[in-house]
Image (cartoon, rainbow, N blue to C red):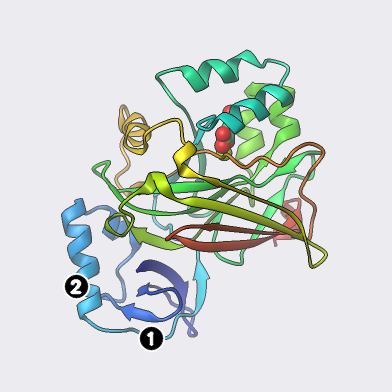
C-alpha cells in the first residue's frame, strides 16, 4: 500500500491509497493533506490509513506529485555508506573530514528541500548550470511525524554537484540545495509494511538517448547507521510540526568521469517502495 499525492483531472490536489496503480482507499475528507497526517502520533496515522482503506476505492489517480506538502522539510544524511566515504575522499581537497564523519557518533545531516522544491514521479530534476560534475544519489528516505516517529518510507534522489562540493566542503549547501535538486516518490509506503528496512535492495538505471548508460545496485544492509538514530539526531534540538523526510545517504556513486547530462532519465527502484523516474534538465530556466 502507498499513500499517494496527486493532481486530479479537475486540478485538485488529493491523497489516495494505492496498491501501485489502483486506488484502494480514500480519506473521508478530500481536504486531508499529508501534513495533517504527519501531525498525528504514529498509532493515529495508522488508524487514518486503515480507515481510508475501509472507505473503499477513490477516484482514478491523476498526475502524481511528490509526497510532501505544508511545511514538511526534507533533510539528508551524508557519508552513511562506505562507498560514499570513498567517493567524497576522492573528489575532495580535504579528504579527512569524510573519514572523520563516517566514523563519528554524530552523523552529517543537512537541509535538502521543502515541498516547493521537491518533484515527484516523472517530474524534472536539474543539474546546476554552473557545475561540471553532477550525479543522482538514490537514497532510502524515512518519513517521520511531528513526534519523530518513523511512519513510512519513500525513494529520495539527492541530486548533487560533485564539482562544487569537491572544490570546498563549505560549498555543500550550493552543491545540494538548488531548483530541481530533489525528487521524492512515488508515494509513502507505511512503516508497518516494511518489516526490515535494512534488507532493501536499491537499484539505479540511467538512460541516455533511449539506451541504458549506467546501472548499479546496492542494499540498505550496507548502511553504517541506524535509521532511528539518524531521525533522533534530526529532532534532537529542532521541531518538525509537519514532520520531516530524511534521505539516508547514497551507496551508488557512478565512477568518474560519469556526469549527468540534460535529457538523461534516472530510474531508481527500492524493494517495497516502487520506482521513481525523472528526466534531467540543465539549469533552473529549463525547469519552467
Ligand atoms: O558529505 C556530503 C554529502 C554526502 C551525501 O549526500 C551522501 O553520502 O549521500
Ligand atoms: Mg546524498
Considering only vertical position in the picture, is 105 above or below 207?
Answer: above
Residue with the mark numbered 1: 59
Instruction: Please name the residue shown 73% across and 31% down the image.
Output: 164
Considering only vertical position in the picture, is 45 above or below 165?
Answer: below
Question: x and y percent of residue 189 in the render?
Answer: 37, 60
Residue 252 sits in which quadrant?
A: top right
Where disc 1 sits, the SS reads loop
Which is more N-terminal, label 1 or label 2? 2
Q: Can residue 28 be seen?
A: no
Instruction: Please name the residue shown 25% across and 76% down the image.
Output: 53
Q: Residues within 10 Å of mark 1 (few under 14, many from 20)?
A: some
226 horizontally vs 40: left or right: right
| Of residues 96 and 16, the one drawn nearer to the viewer in this rendering | 96
Question: x and y percent of residue 254 in the render?
Answer: 71, 42
Considering only vertical position in the picture, is 163 above or below 206?
Answer: above
Structural distance between the alpha carbons of marks 2 and 1: 17 Å
Residue 160 sits in which quadrant?
A: top right
Instruction: Please name the residue shown 71% across and 22% down the image.
Output: 92
Residue with the mark numbered 2: 51
- Looking at the image, do the residues carrying marks 2 and 1 touch, with CB atoms under 8 Å apart? no
Amino acid at each position: 500500500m502507498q499513500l499517494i499525492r496527486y493532481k486530479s483531472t479537475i486540478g485538485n490536489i488529493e491523497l489516495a491509497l494505492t496498491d501501485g496503480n489502483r486506488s484502494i482507499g480514500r480519506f473521508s475528507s478530500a481536504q486531508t493533506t499529508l501534513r495533517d497526517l504527519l501531525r498525528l502520533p504514529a498509532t493515529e496515522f495508522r488508524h487514518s490509513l486503515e480507515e481510508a482503506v475501509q472507505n473503499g476505492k477513490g477516484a482514478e489517480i491523476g498526475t502524481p506529485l511528490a509526497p510532501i506538502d505544508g511545511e514538511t522539510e526534507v533533510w539528508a544524511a551524508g557519508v552513511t555508506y562506505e562507498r560514499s566515504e570513498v567517493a567524497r575522499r576522492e573528489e575532495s581537497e580535504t579528504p579527512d573530514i569524510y573519514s572523520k564523519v563516517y566514523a563519528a557518533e554524530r552523523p552529517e545531516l543537512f537541509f535538502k528541500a521543502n515541498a516547493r522544491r521537491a518533484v515527484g514521479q516523472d517530474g524534472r530534476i536539474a543539474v546546476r548550470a554552473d557545475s561540471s560534475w553532477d550525479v543522482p544519489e538514490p537514497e532510502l528516505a524515512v518519513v517521520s511525524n511531528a513526534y519523530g516517529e518513523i511512519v513510512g518510507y519513500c525513494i529520495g534522489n539527492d541530486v548533487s554537484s560533485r564539482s562544487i562540493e569537491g572544490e570546498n566542503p563549505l560549498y555543500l549547501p550550493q552543491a545540494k540545495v538548488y531548483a530541481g535538486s530533489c525528487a521524492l516518490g512515488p508515494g509513502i509506503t507505511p512503516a508497518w509494511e516494511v518489516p526490515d528496512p535494512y534488507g532493501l535492495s536499491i537499484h539505479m538505471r540511467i538512460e541516455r538517448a533511449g539506451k541504458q548508460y549506467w546501472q548499479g545496485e546496492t542494499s540498505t544492509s550496507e548502511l553504517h547507521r541506524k535509521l532511528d538514530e539518524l531521525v533522533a539526531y534530526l529532532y534532537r534540538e529542532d521541531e518538525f510540526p509537519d514532520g520531516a523526510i530524511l534521505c539516508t545517504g547514497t551507496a551508488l556513486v557512478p565512477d568518474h568521469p560519469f556526469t549527468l547530462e540534460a535529457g538523461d532519465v534516472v530510474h531508481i527502484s527500492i524493494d517495497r517502495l516502487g520506482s521513481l523516474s525523472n528526466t534531467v534538465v540543465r539549469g533552473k530556466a529549463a525547469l519552467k
